[in-house]
Image (cartoon, grey):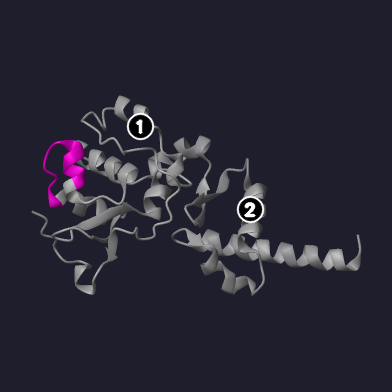
Amino acid sequence: MSEKDDNVSEVLERHLRILEAILFAASEPLDANSLLPYLGGGVRVVATLKILQQRYAGRGVNLVRRGDKWAFRTAEDLGFLLRREEQETRPLSRASLETLSIIAYHQPSTRAEIEEVRGVATGKGTLDLLMEAGWIRMRGRRRTPGRPVTYGTTDAFLDHFGLESLGDLPGLDELKGSGLLSNRLPPDMQIPLPFDGQLRDDEDPLEPDDIGADEAED
């Protein structure tokens, strides 16, 4: 190996150690843009993360991708060892699970669209609960009369359910088999492609007053 190769290898190893340290210390998944300042310009952050991911494959802790973000997580086959350390959480109601499923598969969704799929009214408290959990967010406003708020899932949703992207969601038949989507489904409701989170052509950005404000969707 030449001296140049030695230098390249040494720089790569340093970058890997830096990423390892930052991600271990992070309280939430981080994206490549957040990590780049620690490595310097010109570094292919995602390619370096994939090398680190390969090194941790098969270990007790794995480097996983959640949307565009990365984090260390306990290997799935060892999760049972940590169950006694988990906090007791109140299980979601059927209404919350069904609402979350509809948003995940049919986003961006308005409250009226969620109600059309479920066949029953969706209380604002259900949406508030899912937002407090960090699993859904207000995306924008639909360009229709009344300009209703649209909802979509978050990276925290992917992280909690162990998904790299929305394309990893189970099929609709499996979801209906579990009883979460037993009502009539719209004909355009399909398994989503990986979702970039950007506003669609029929959505306007949220206004500053929309954040944290109560929504009136009658």
The numbered mark, 2 or 1, whose residue comes first in the sequence reads 2
Q: Could you tell me if residue 91 is visible in this image? A: no
In percent of the image, x 66 and y 47: which residue is there? Answer: 54
Residue 29, relative to residue 64: is it above or below? Answer: below
> Where is residue 197, by image quadrant?
bottom left
| Crowding near the residue tagged with mark 2, few <14, some 14–19, many ≥20 C-alpha atoms within 10 Å | some
Along the viewing direction, whichever of 21 and 145 lies nearer the viewer:
145
In percent of the image, x 37 and y 49: which residue is there? Answer: 157
Label at residue 70: none
The local secondary structure at tag 1 comes to helix
Give the Cα separation between the discs numbered 2 and 1: 31 Å
The stretch of residues the image draws in magenta is 113-124
> Where is residue 137, by image quadrant?
bottom left
* Residue indicated by mark 1: 172
The local secondary structure at tag 2 comes to helix
Label at residue 50: 2
The answer to whether 101 appears left or right of 155 in the picture is left
The amino acid type found where label 1 is placed reads: Leu
Residue 49, relative to residue 122: is it above or below? Answer: below
